[in-house]
Image (cartoon, rainbow, N blue to C red):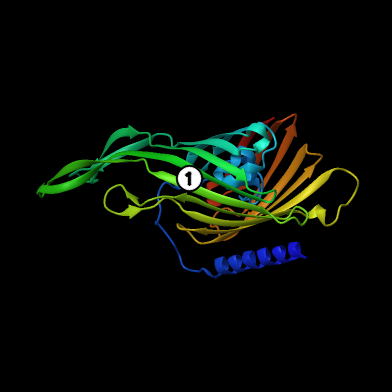
Amino acid sequence: MKNKRKIVLCGLIFGAAVQFVAAQDYKKLAQTGFQFLSVNSDGRASALAGAVTATEMGSAALFFNPATMGGMTGLIDATASINEFIADIRHNTFSLALSPLRGEYGVIGFSVQTVDYGELQGTRVAANDKGFVDTEIMTPTALAIGVGYAKRLTDRFTVGGQIKYTHQNLHESFVVASRVTPDSLETGTVENELSPLAYDFGTLFKTGFKSLAFGMSVRNFSREIKYAEEGFQLPLVFQLGIAMDLFDLWKPGVIDHSLVMSVDATHYRSHPEQILVGLDYRVMDFLSFRGGYVSNNDEDGLTFGFGVCYMGLSLDYAYTPFGVFDRVQRMTARFSM
């Protein structure tokens, strides 16, 4: 009876959150920076449209909900991901988690996220017909390094958090300091380099009814920072999620397989709210076929992918049609033991 009450209560809370998210119709634009922190590079999570807040992800949980890292049963879990993003930008991530004594003292994890923007042609203002001249070739950089911890407080409730050192260098920019004569300009330079700290926090609650679980995460919480005059914060996001193996309700056939459905409701500081839906069909813990959908997005909505796992080694791939940007492909290698 108590379990039923908990399930009903959690369902009401999640339903209210979804209604709140759906009711938001105002536009939020240009309110955050360091947008590379919002990019999902994990092959498994991307194929599920990012709806993994209530899904145990091993060390990769540090990029989504650090609490779900606490469900590790092995000693070590490591992932490495490559994300061929739009405009020839490459996002690379790496994560490592250690669970000594099967998580009795919790799970500690480390995460790294880097961005390769390629080479960009720099310019500066000038008193000529074009109003500018070319300068050096620039190579902007972005980096985030995190340390996280997760602990099962009970057999159903897990908490986790992460602190991240973030860094972004957009090179120096030339600005007009004053106008010396009508035909000449005096310029100065401004360094565009910042290194704020960011914080993530999450929880995971297993209801006890079959595999039904609820998750919550808050990511990229930081102080306000600024490059020149206008202040901004990192891309803060609040996310609620629910996940369950649908075959727990009806187990067709005799082979060992599962069909996990996950749904997330997201609240962003930088853009409108979204609903994320993912389906993961797995056969004998060896082969997975995945699909997902992201609501309220301009260019991408549907996501697809698959995964193969054997003897602790996994390979996950995600393909996302991206409108005028063609497509985005992500690949993740994972090792667990």
Q: Quadrant of the C terminus?
A: top right
Q: Is residue 112 above or below residue 48?
A: above
Count of all numbered marks drawn on residues in the image: 1
Query: Which residue matches tag 1?
Result: 37
Q: Position of residue 60 (x, y in %)?
A: 60, 40
Observer able to see residue 225: yes
Mark 1 burial class by Cα count in 10 Å: few <14, some 14-19, many 20+: many
Dot 1: element: helix
Residue at 58% in and 43% down = 150
Q: Quadrant of the N terminus?
A: bottom right
Q: Amino acid at mark 1?
A: Leu
Relative placement, left or right, of 69 versus 192 is right
Residue 72 is drawn in which quadrant?
top right
Residue 333 is drawn in which quadrant?
top right
Observer able to see residue 334: no
Residue 20 is drawn in which quadrant?
bottom right
Determine the residue located farthest toward the left in the rendered image.
Answer: 181
Q: Position of residue 8 (x, y in %)?
A: 71, 67
Q: Position of residue 218 (x, y in %)?
A: 52, 53
Relative placement, left or right, of 209 versus 85 is right
